[in-house]
Image: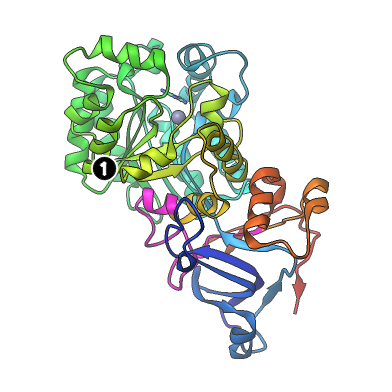
Amino acid sequence: QKTELSAFRAPLLHFLDDPGLDAAQPDSYVWYPDGLLLVADGRVQAIGPANELLPTLSADVPLEHWPDRLIVPGFIDAHVHLPQLGVIGSYGAQLLDWLETYTFPAERRFGDPDWAQTQAARFMDELLRHGTTSALVFCTAHPASVDALFQAAENTGMAITAGKVMMDRHAPADLCDEAEQSYRDSRRLIERWHGRGRLRYAVTPRFAPTSTPEQLTLAGRLMSEYPDVLMQTHWAENKAEIAWVRDLFPERHSYLDVYDHYGLLTERSVLAHGIHIDDTDRNRLAQTGARIAFCPTSNTFLGSGLFDLPAARASDVAVGLATDVGGGTSLSLLATMGEAYKVGQLNGRALSPFQAFYLATLGNARVLHQADETGNLEPGKQADFLVLDPAATPMLAHKQAPDASLSERLFDLMILGDDRCIQRSYVAGVCRYDRSPTTRALIA
Ligand code: GUN
Ligand code: ZN
């Protein structure tokens, strides 16, 4: 009888805590230049230096050896849109005309359940190909788009949180729902999917301009009726958007106050963007525990502005890192870290590679309330991990120096790396993506 245990030997990095914005706190991460990861029944059984753990293994345990690769926890995307793969890289628009011109037409196609299913399967494949093993996802206003996504996620075993867009005004009629119906549809989807395996639901009002006060009220009611679902929306991304919200909700002090008023600010709330905000907003976020998803490739591509990460951190606001595809230009969290670094530079403060890798793994797991199961490779957690190839491209290979520090190696990956660096993606111990099945690990 073969044991269920399997072993992965490689340079190995994961985080135990937030490394901070400057020099990494030494206890915040664990780095094994020659590490061993033991997996049983989809979960991490042990992690440590190879020379300590290898002698404990019996000879029949299958072992993969990746001496010139790097194992890290699977990346987590804190904000991404299922229906927007085809919208990526759409020319010449900023948020509001981008929605009208490109995004709403693409989302309309999800009225066809066959299309939704094909796209959902493709979406999961693309996430895995980019090293993303978990995500918080916007679907469309069509309930069938949520069924399609959750079904595809269940087929891969991934921890996915998603929701039906609630949108009952200021969008094409055939994309809009109606307040009461959106409440009932959301409830039905919560009952069907929330807590099934690794799947969870997020109440998903698109953003304040596309919901009536009645719909926002019902979204708030869902949050109080189902206290463990998440809430996701967009907030303070673009100046024209913010002016529009001021016109639509003149009785509210601020854009954030709209969400606050309808009971949508809790520690389970993830607000994408939050660029044009002030300390009153930050303090209210910190008080309520609501989080921001920082989407750097989207913010630069759509010309939205530069998110101020240090200011958010100084006010104790939790921040995650996200691609926001199709406003964002890549599903790769590596590419996203690189863009976050450039946004930091334009704000006058560099983003450290430790902070960037923390955000994409344990940081996002905490933001999405799933750090008990994901985010690092502590024993007992789900074995969601990546084999990264630090020399995946000629430029990366050329830059490799034998004496490079860990920080330099991570920085090369985040500045020059992307989906080409993903050798393999494992979900709950199962290899769900293999870049080149012909490239074999050394089998000991
Ligand atoms: N605000 C409202 N909807 C969207 C969307 O789909 N993408 C982005 N980036 N911002 C939004
Ligand atoms: Zn978005």
- Which residue: 24% across, 28% down? 259
Split into 4 quadrants, where in the image is the C terminus? bottom right
Would you say residue 158 is visible in this rendering?
A: no
Based on the picture, tell me whether residue 369 belongs to the magenta stretch. yes
SS type, badge 1: helix
Based on the picture, tell me whether residue 195 belongs to the magenta stretch. no
How many other residues sit within 10 Å of disc 1, few (<14), some (14-19) or many (≥20)?
some
Q: Is residue 342 left or right of residue 209?
A: right
Query: Measured along the vertical axis of the image, is residue 276 above or below residue 3?
Result: above
Q: Is residue 436 left or right of residue 425?
A: right
Q: Could you say where residue 168 lies in the image, as x and y percent from the top left?
A: 30, 17
Q: Nearer the viewer, residue 143 or 136?
A: 136
Query: Measured along the vertical axis of the image, is residue 237 above or below residue 399?
Result: above
Q: Could you say where residue 63 lies in the image, as x and y percent from the top left?
A: 68, 76
Q: Within the image, what quadrant is residue 341 found in?
A: top right
Q: Residue furthest front?
A: 348
Q: Nearer the viewer, residue 273 or 3?
A: 273
Q: Nearer the viewer, residue 217 or 48?
A: 48
**Magenta region:** 363-387
Q: Is residue 44 left or right of residue 281?
A: right
Q: Amino acid at mark 1?
A: Ala
**Type of colouring:** rainbow
The verdict on label 1 being within 8 Å of ligand 2 is: no
Quadrant of picture, ligand 2? top left
Name the residue beneath numbered marker 1: 286
Q: Could you say where residue 180 lies in the image, as x and y percent from the top left?
A: 21, 23
Split into 4 quadrants, where in the image is the N terminus? bottom right
Q: Is residue 383 left or right of residue 425?
A: left
Would you say residue 214 is visible in this rendering?
A: yes
Q: Could you say where residue 81 lies in the image, as x and y percent from the top left?
A: 48, 32
